[in-house]
Image (cartoon, rainbow, N blue to C red):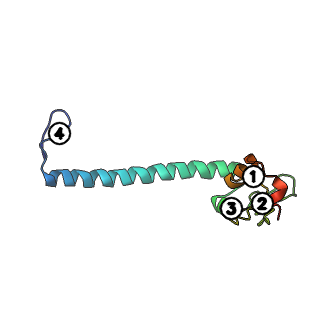
Amino acid sequence: MAKGEGNGFNLETATLEELEEMRHRIDTRAAAVRAEKRETVMAQVRELLASIGETPEGLARGARRPATGGGKKAGASLGSVAAKYRDPESAQTWTGRGKQPVWLRDKLAAGARLEDFAV
């Protein structure tokens, strides 16, 4: 191997074969460190989940235990909502939820009324 001061390897004088071998060793070590880190983090996650009576599998399924025994599950789908407003020129729609779309804001700023676009 190309010798340098201190660390025993000099990038500036290393051959292509030496550099490729070093890259392989670095990649192998990085994968091992990544796997060790993942296992450490997963153990911490399992411990935290166990402290609230949950498992990683239950969390992945989205299973939530209601705190008071009733109500909707967190993350439950609200379903699709029918459009309440439509642009007659472009046929773009808006349900009336969330921020107003740009096309509607522009038309309202130009003097149109919201009722003009009601479906």
**Local SS, label 4:** loop
Q: Earlier in the sequence, mark 4 or mark 1?
A: 4
Q: Which mark sits nearer the N-terminus, 4 or 3?
A: 4
- Return the residue found at the far top: 6
Separation of disc 4 and disc 2 at Cα?
66 Å
| Alpha carbons under labels 4 and 1: distance apart | 61 Å
Instruction: Tell me which amino acid carries mark 3.
Output: Gly
Q: Is residue 52 visible?
A: no
Q: Please give the residue where the numbered disc 1 appears in the rendered image.
A: 98
Residue 36 marker = none
On screen, residue 95 above or below 2: below
Q: Which residue is mark 2?
A: 95
Task: Nearest to the eye among marks 1 and 3: give it.
Answer: 1
**Which residue is disc 3 drawn over?**
58
Q: Which one is earlier in the sequence, the residue at label 4 or at label 2?
A: 4
Residue drawn at (79%, 56%), measured in percent from left and top?
A: 96
Q: Earlier in the sequence, mark 1 or mark 3?
A: 3
| Lateral position of residue 112 relative to residue 16, left or right | right
Residue type of the residue flagged with mark 4 = Gly
Callouts 1 and 2 close, C-beta under 8 Å: yes
Q: Which residue is mark 4?
A: 8
Quadrant including the C terminus: bottom right
